[in-house]
Amino acid sequence: MSARTLRNRLSQSKILVVPGGGSPLELRLIEAQGFEAGYVSGYATAASRYAEPDIGLIAYADVEQAVLSMRRVTSIPLIVDCDTGYGDVANVVRTVRGMELLGVAAIQIEDQAWPKKCGHMDNKIVEPRDIAIRKVKAAVLARENADTLIVARTDARGPMGMNEALERCRAFKDAGADILFVDGPQSTEELELIGRTLPGPLIANMSETGLTPLHSAQELEQMGYAIALFPSSTVRLTIGVLGRFLKDLQAKGDSRDWVNQMASLEQTNDLLGLSDIRAFEQQLLKTIQS
């Protein structure tokens, strides 16, 4: 159902704002704030689950477990960063079908060579174009739910230039990809070029302090994008804000200056579903007593 929901939503003209995270708490917060979809970021998953950088240190099983934990506490459509598919064609097939079993709405495959890196790091290496196309075709043919969306991402802009990135995306579309994603454009002009020349739906990656200049969702919509992606903002905020809090706590031994920036105990328990658990317990008690 979530795959069809996302597919139908992308048929609308209004851009979809999608925040990302790597933990069930982040995705639960995203849903609680009313976002229509969430992004399971490889970068955020490596950071949230293992405090490791996004340089190919996590594998399929890590992402599978991350998605499973998120699915237990969320119902919004999930777009999942599945890196390179974790191998060649057989791995891509396993990845797509495994994600479908978890109810994922969209599966993202990229064309970097393994071990891959965050798309906004330097010295990236991409696979030959024919291999990248073959893997996108495999992802498209592997899906068993016709509503599952395949996101084809290219990282060719950095090592090979914008023309190669555009050509790859056109080939990915011909191979059956539903959504195209050029990562790492380095100017507003390049963002506009992508939006003007590639068939949609298109993703724009707003990775703060990365290679791509930041724009609002409204600005990106005017450029031709369907999804404004904020994949790791939650992780950056966690590191920045929590780091400042801990530094202050170490210096003062006092958290009172921070209380107004915290969720209350009641708000925290409510977000974590305590009220639902208590309501279930009361219902069960009534059943037993009757």
Image: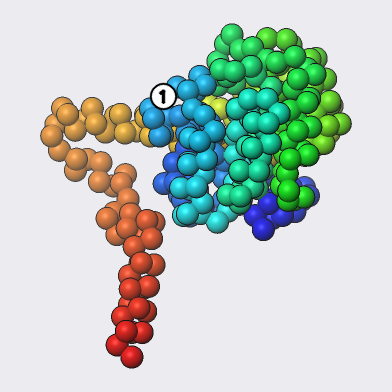
Q: Quadrant of residue 268?
A: bottom left
> Of residues 156 and 92, which is closer to you in this image?
92
Above or below, comparing residue 270 to residue 124 in the picture? below
**Residue 184: percent from the left, percent from the top?**
64, 20
Residue lying at 80% horizontally and 28% vertically, measured from the top left? 172
- Check disc 1 and report the residue beneath it: 52
User: In screen coordinates, is 90 left or right of 51?
Assistant: right
Q: Quadrant of the C terminus?
A: bottom left
Question: Seen from this angle, which residue lies furthest left?
Answer: 253
User: In screen coordinates, is 97 left or right of 288?
Assistant: right
Q: Is residue 60 visible?
A: yes
Residue lying at 70% horizontally and 15% vertically, measured from the top left? 127
Circle 1 SS class:
loop
Question: Seen from this angle, which residue lies furthest front?
Answer: 90
The colour scheme used to paint the residues is: rainbow
Above or below, comparing residue 148 to residue 119 in the picture? below
Q: Is residue 20 visible?
A: no
Residue lying at 57% horizontally and 45% vertically, measured from the top left? 38
**Residue 110: percent from the left, percent from the top?**
67, 26
User: In screen coordinates, is 173 left or right of 284?
Assistant: right
Q: Which amino acid does label 1 sit on?
A: Glu
Above or below, comparing residue 144 to residue 119 in the picture? below
**Residue 162: percent from the left, percent from the top?**
76, 15
> Of residues 187 and 76, which is closer to you in this image?
76
User: In screen coordinates, is 259 left or right of 40?
Assistant: left
Residue lying at 69% horizontally and 22% vertically, measured from the top left? 111
Q: How many labels does the image show?
A: 1
> Of residues 89 and 185, which is closer to you in this image?
89
Instruction: Judge the density around disc 1: few (<14), some (14-19), many (≥20) Cα neighbours within 10 Å.
Output: some
Q: In which quarter of the image is the N terminus?
A: bottom right
Question: Seen from this angle, which residue lies furthest bottom?
Answer: 290
**Residue 56: percent from the left, percent from the top?**
52, 21
